[in-house]
Image (cartoon, grey):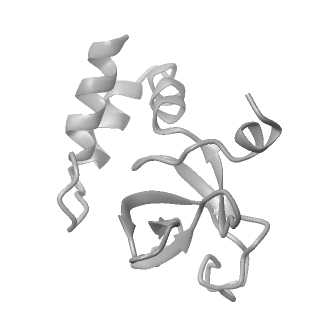
Amino acid sequence: MAKHEAEFPPLCVGDRVRRGPDWEWGDQDCNEDGEQQEGEVIAVYSAGSDLPWFNVKWDSGADGWSYRYGPSVHDVQKVASFQEKVRDILQRPDGLKELIIPLKWESPIKQPSRTQRAKAFLHSL
């Protein structure tokens, strides 16, 4: 695996991200106290360029913002994959309940729902 691939692995819907090295979007990722937040990729699309764009819902509640992530530019950086996040939650005593309840939110863009992704992941274990 190339050094670049190790530093910037592919992003998928459900992955956790934070501000990346090429960030130029002001405080879009900050809470009301100005602290940078992590967020979740909720959609992937092409904006007519060679780079994919990723729509992120920030933990601060802000969503609808899109960021570049490709070979030459990284507005965001992966913190954890969806699968890692689910594995961590399932290790907790009430993990399954904690996982299923928040999965009711769905992206307005036609993507597999969180419930569908969770079921597929659990089936793969």
Q: Nearer the viewer, residue 118 or 97?
A: 118
Can you say whether 7 is above or below 54 in the image?
A: above
* Viewer-closest of 17 and 8: 8
Q: Is residue 43 left or right of residue 79?
A: left
Q: Quadrant of residue 20?
A: bottom right
User: Is 20 left or right of 45, judged from the image as shown?
Assistant: right
Residue at the image position 72 percent from the left and 76 percent from the top: 23
User: Percent from the top left, x then y, of residue 10?
Assistant: 56, 44
Q: Is residue 10 left or right of residue 97?
A: right
| Residue 74 location, quadrant | bottom right
Where does the image place residue 98, in percent across and percent down from the top left? 37, 36
Q: Look at 59% across and 83% down and name the residue there.
A: 28
Q: In the image, what residue occupies the spot 39% across and 50% down?
A: 13
Q: Position of residue 69 (x, y in %)?
A: 59, 62
Q: Residue furthest top?
A: 125
| Quarter of the image that includes the N terminus | top right
The C terminus sits in image quarter: top left
Task: Point out residue 5 in the picture as x, y percentages from the top left corner.
Answer: 70, 40
Residue at horizontal 22%, vertical 57%? 106
Task: Say if 119 sits above or below 105 in the image.
Answer: above
Q: How many marks?
A: 0
